[in-house]
Amino acid sequence: MEQDIRQILIETDELQKRIKELGQEITRDYKGKDLVVICVLKGAVMFMSDLCKNIDLPLSIDFMAVSSYGSSTQSSGVVRILKDLDSSIEDKDVLIVEDIIDTGLTLSYLVENLKSRGPKSVKLCTLLNKPERRKTDVKVDYIGFTIPDEFVVGYGLDFNEKYRNLPYICVLKEEVYK
Ligand code: PRP
Ligand code: MN
Ligand code: MG
């Protein structure tokens, strides 16, 4: 895999340091609340796992799978629910955890969908934010890193389902995905 990488954007230790800070911030904000962390499969799985280890509160974890990209590097704008939550979020304080917000189409759909289920609150935490690519306005409550408009993989993020297991965030060589 290393031969496909053009540049490492965020190293492993930098990622972990920032995730620890986010976990501490969330711990302070959700003290005494009934927190449900929702991991958006599959991209957010690594981030959710490391983030939750840094939240020092009782919480539950649930998973939702939505897809807007398919196998392309471009967002189609079509959001499909592939797997719904296992449990009700009624009266819960919901924190949606994402790996990246790009156009915002996936998340704006998801936030509206979850808000219609009667939660006490819905907030959004993303590891990466790419504001240059936004097509719809989404309010993001916790952001790990703001990054430039480049196609990134690693730490959960894929290209054609590969590279999710890299422990850092990197940019692929153009010939790999062109
Ligand atoms: C990617 C990423 C976010 C979403 C962001 O998921 O993980 O969920 O796209 O794009 P947007 O802001 O333009 O909507 P993808 O659909 O590739 O599924 P995956 O998480 O299983 O890789
Ligand atoms: Mn995703
Ligand atoms: Mg993907």
Image: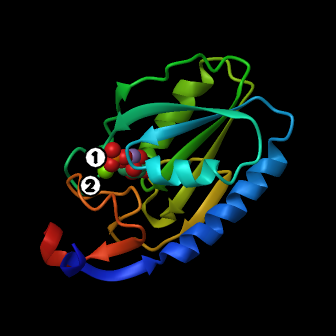
- Residue 139 visible from this viewpoint: no
Q: Secondary structure at mark 1?
A: loop
Residue 172, x across and y down, in percent? 26, 74
- Gap between marks 2 and 1, in whole Å? 6 Å
Residue drawn at the location 50% of the way across and 19% of the way down:
86
Q: Residue 119 bears which disc, if any?
A: none
Q: Under 8 Å from ligand 1: the CB of mark 1?
A: yes
Location of the C terminus (image quadrant): bottom left
Q: Residue 69 bears which disc, if any?
A: 1
Please, what is the three-letter code of the amino acid marked with disc 2?
A: Gln
Residue 63, x across and y down, in percent? 48, 32
Few, some or many residues within 10 Å of mark 1 (<14, 14–19, 20+): some
Q: Is residue 111 above or below residue 178?
A: above
Q: Secondary structure at mark 2?
A: loop
Residue 153, x across and y down, in percent? 34, 65
Tag 2–tag 1 contact (CB < 8 Å): yes
Please, what is the three-letter code of the amino acid marked with disc 1?
A: Tyr
Q: Under 8 Å from ligand 1: the CB of mark 2?
A: no
Q: Of the two numbered discs 2 and 1 on the same chain, state the one appearing first in sequence.
A: 1
Residue lying farthest to the bottom in this orientation: 7
Location of the N terminus (image quadrant): bottom left
Q: Provide the residue designation for mark 2.
A: 74
Q: Is residue 44 above or below residue 1?
A: above
Q: Is residue 62 above or below residue 87?
A: below
Residue 146, x across and y down, in percent? 55, 69
Few, some or many residues within 10 Å of mark 2 (<14, 14–19, 20+): few
Q: Nearer the viewer, residue 66 or 48?
A: 48
